[in-house]
Image: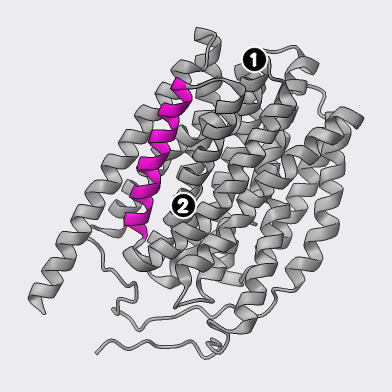
Amino acid sequence: MVTIAQSPRADFSGVDSTYAWIRLFVALVLGTIGSVGMWSYVVALPPVQADFGILRNAASLPYTMAMIGFAFGGVVMGRLADRHGIVFPAILGTVLLAVGYICAGYAPNIWMLDAAHVVIGAGTSATFGPIVSDMSHWFKKRRGVAIGIASCGNYLSGAVWPPIVQHFIVSDGWRATHIGIGIFCIVTMIPLILMMRRPTPVEHAAPGVVTHVRGTLGLKPNTLQGLLAIAGIACCVAMAMPQVHIVAYCADLGYGVARGAEMLSLMLGLGLIARVASGSIADKIGGLSALLIGSALQAFALLLYLGFNGLTSLYVVSALFGLFQGGIIPMYAVIVREYFPPKDAGMRTGIALMFALFGMALGGWMSGAIFDLTGSYRAAFANGFLWNLLNIAIIGWLLIRSRTSTSGRLAAA
């Protein structure tokens, strides 16, 4: 019989409780504000390029630096959350956000803006991976849904912030807008973080006891983590093309920056539906299956971008892209909870998201570089599709292995 040893300080009374749902709502709001660091520069890219008089690939680098800061910061913040709870890393991330945005507003050149966005990315990381990992401990029956909702803050931020940022860039300039964002974050986020001071009920297993629910796939933990890392890079190189460059793409087609910002908001807003739906699907069929469905649909949407570039069709394809790929990233957190020990959830989730964000960073820069070389985004969309196929191959193989592993355990029983 499998037994679970509880820490003397662990409090399981809050799991699946009313408090857990209230905490989930606070986490959603906190993630919506804090994830501004992922989306503000998508809108700021054209005016920054014009201000500094640089090429598109150089102008794309601050976004890449933000993703790199987000990636490494997520691992560190996740480890801090595993050791100290969510409050300390969340407050640290808020301070980094404020400092990064204010420094960005005063950046004299693109290199200083790059450095400021590393800080912004590190600050943003505290309100995504660690928050999602924290909420996974508060739910058992509806864990996939809870992870999906917690991760919605990231996409809700993408739906809410771009039009706001665009408005203030037009009225006050991109520098003043960055400074204002930094001040707004520290004023609003600290009170929300203090509402999450209750200790998180992390399960602690007795030595040698497996608590993750789907076994190990017959792989060493670090081997599985490595495969998830490659898969994350591949799917997010593909994901970055529309998300990072849709505003610039619309400007190049003559539709204007504002139309691109609207498409980005539509894309990410509809992605919210996918995040909750994918969580519900994962509760029924598992994280690997849900991830494979999302990845296959994302590949299909990228092919649609290759075939359609009219204004109306771009709105439609962007909406479909959001619906198809919105649930992909949260599934890595679900998979971590299914195949790794709960006590390592923050760090393991941070590592998985780190490599996914490497893919976003690489994809954002690579798409700009391909545009500079070819003068068109068609090759960039095709490049994203090929990377997406690599993700499908890895996740498909892991899924086949999981079915074989499950059949073996049932036969042994």
Q: Is residue 118 on the magenta stretch?
A: no
10 relative to 87 in the view: left or right: left
The image shows residue 367 at horizontal and vertical percentages of 52, 22
From this view, report whether residue 268 is shown above or below residue 13.
above
Say which residue appears at 63% left-offset and 15% top-offset: 253
Residue 3 against residue 291 in the figure, above or below: below
Question: What secondary structure is marked by label 2?
Answer: helix
The residue wearing badge 1 is 252
**Crowdedness of circle 2 by 10 Å Cα count: few (<14), some, many (20+)?**
many
Residue 333: % across, % down? 45, 59
- The residue to which callout 2 is attached is 351
User: Residue drawn 77% across and 15% down?
Assistant: 50
What segment carries the magenta color? Answer: 287-307
Residue in the image at 70% along x and 32% along y = 261
Predominant secondary structure in magenta?
helix
Q: Is residue 3 left or right of residue 180?
A: left
Q: Is residue 199 visible?
A: no
Instruction: Judge whether residue 169 can be spotted in this image.
Output: yes
